[in-house]
Amino acid sequence: MSDGTPADLFFDAAITLLHRVKEEEAEAVTAAGTLLADTVAAGGRLFAFGAGHSSLPAQDVVYRAGGLALMNLLAVPGVVGVDVTPATLGSALERVDGLASAVLATSPLRAGDALVVISLSGRNALPVEMALTARSLGVKVIGVTSVAYAAETTSRHTSGTFLKDHCDVVLDSKIPVGDAELTLDTIPAPFAPASTVVTSALMQAVMATTAATLADRGIEPPLLRSGNVDGGHEWNRRIMEQYGDRIFYRH
């Protein structure tokens, strides 16, 4: 590790990754935002899914001030975040065949909807099966993953494929295998993961593109406002009444 404090070096690494995705994933971000705008304009519903720490960027775009009111979290019990005990159970559930199909069979997803599947490695059975099965149901799928894992690891899904192989649009986070940006001679393992920072930025870039694309078509994007500004609750109440049949986190 070169000169500079660990904090400086982490910020530099994260900024470098953000610059990379800004430049190299611009076309994919536009495609993803357009896909979501198309879905909204056609009356479809929007969902986001991630397991473990990959659930954090998914949660970041649901019921969010400045975000799209129509983005719903597709939750799988035991894998959303690290609130399950023991935390290792969540990692184990990601490798269970059939779990995604069972979740989708009882979820509100239907043909014409769009689903964002977030998985850093894209190698586990759950995200692969989630994308594969959703597409078979007529759902458009956006995958947010690190494509490097497909070249440097093996799939844990029975098909031998990765998340990136079952998506209409793929957003590559560019995160290196292992998700740790720093090393020190005095520390035996690499440390300081940046995947949440980069993936959340990618998600917000897609949301911004979706909103602007809808506006360009003369459609008011269904955005939420902060409840901590005057008039925010009234604004949100109007949006939720107007789009209530496509918002599932209220029920």
Image: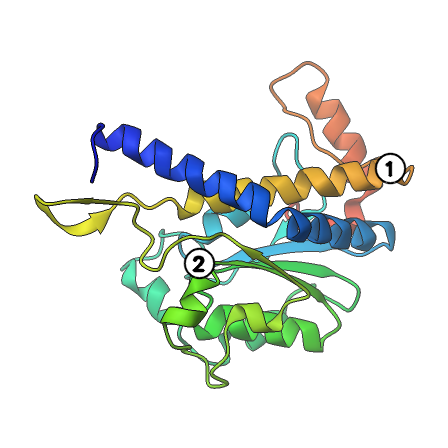
Is residue 67 shown above or below 56? above
Mark 1 residue type:
Asp
Q: Is residue 97 left or right of residue 251?
A: left
Q: Earlier in the sequence, mark 2 or mark 1?
A: 2
Q: Is residue 9 left or right of residue 98?
A: left
Q: Secondary structure at mark 1?
A: helix
Image x and y of residue 72, in percent: 64, 50
Q: Write down the quadrant of residue 233 in the picture.
A: top right
Q: Residue at x 86, y 50 (%)?
A: 41
Farthest residue to the right: give it: 218
Q: Write down the quadrant of residue 221 in the picture.
A: top right
Is residue 168 shown above or below 136? above
Quadrant position of the N terminus in the picture? top left
Q: Which mark is residue 216?
A: 1
Q: Residue at x 80, y 55 (%)?
A: 39
- Residue 233 visible in image: yes
> How many numbered marks, from 0 up?
2
Mark 2 residue type:
Leu
Image x and y of residue 169, in percent: 66, 61
| Crowd around label 1: few <14 · some 14–19 · many ≥20 (10 Å) | few
Mark 2 lies on residue: 120
